[in-house]
Image: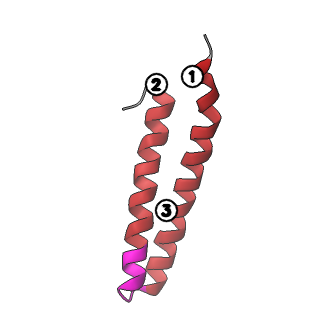
Amino acid sequence: MAANRQQGSYLTMFLTGFTGFVAGLVLWAGGEAAAGIIVTVAGAAVLAYSLVGFRKIRPLEFLD
């Protein structure tokens, strides 16, 4: 899946953040508004951090 250790770390964070984001939306819609908002925001933050990390390491792949 990942070509190097950094990509593997950011991929794991992406999957964790996505899972947290979706779980927060389900909690929020299910009536647990306070917990749902917290989990959704935390998941979105982890998603954003992983995407920034992916953008940072991407140019390194094309170096010879």
Residue that numbered label 3 is attached to: 43
Q: Does the magenta stretch include residue 36?
A: no
Comes first in the chain, label 2 or label 1: 2
Q: How far apart are marks 2 and 1 (CA)?
A: 10 Å
Q: What residue type is labelled 2?
A: Asn
Taking the spot 45% from the left edge, 86% from the top edge, the residue there is 33
SS of the residue at dot 3? helix
Taking the spot 59% from the left edge, 41% from the top edge, the residue there is 53
Give the class, few, some or many, for how many residues have Cα within 10 Å of label 2's Cα (few <14, many ≥20).
few
Q: Does the magenta stretch include residue 27?
A: yes
Taking the spot 62% from the left edge, 45% from the top edge, the residue there is 52
Give the class, few, some or many, for how many residues have Cα within 10 Å of label 3's Cα (few <14, many ≥20).
many
Q: Quadrant of residue 25?
A: bottom left
Residue that numbered label 1 is attached to: 61
Q: Which amino acid does label 1 sit on?
A: Glu
Q: Is residue 38 left or right of residue 62?
A: left
**Overall secondary structure of the magenta stretch?**
helix
Residues at circles 2 and 1 in contact by the CB criterion of under 8 Å: no
Q: Where is residue 1 in the image (x, y as percent from the top left)?
A: 36, 32
Q: Is residue 58 depicted above or below 41 in this figure? A: above
SS of the residue at dot 2? loop
Q: Is residue 12 depicted above or below 28 in this figure? A: above
- Name the quadrant of the C terminus: top right
Magenta-drawn segment: 25-32
Q: What residue type is labelled 3?
A: Gly
Q: Where is residue 29 in the image (x, y as percent from the top left)?
A: 39, 84
Label of residue 24 in the image: none
Comes first in the chain, label 3 or label 2: 2
Residue that numbered label 2 is attached to: 4
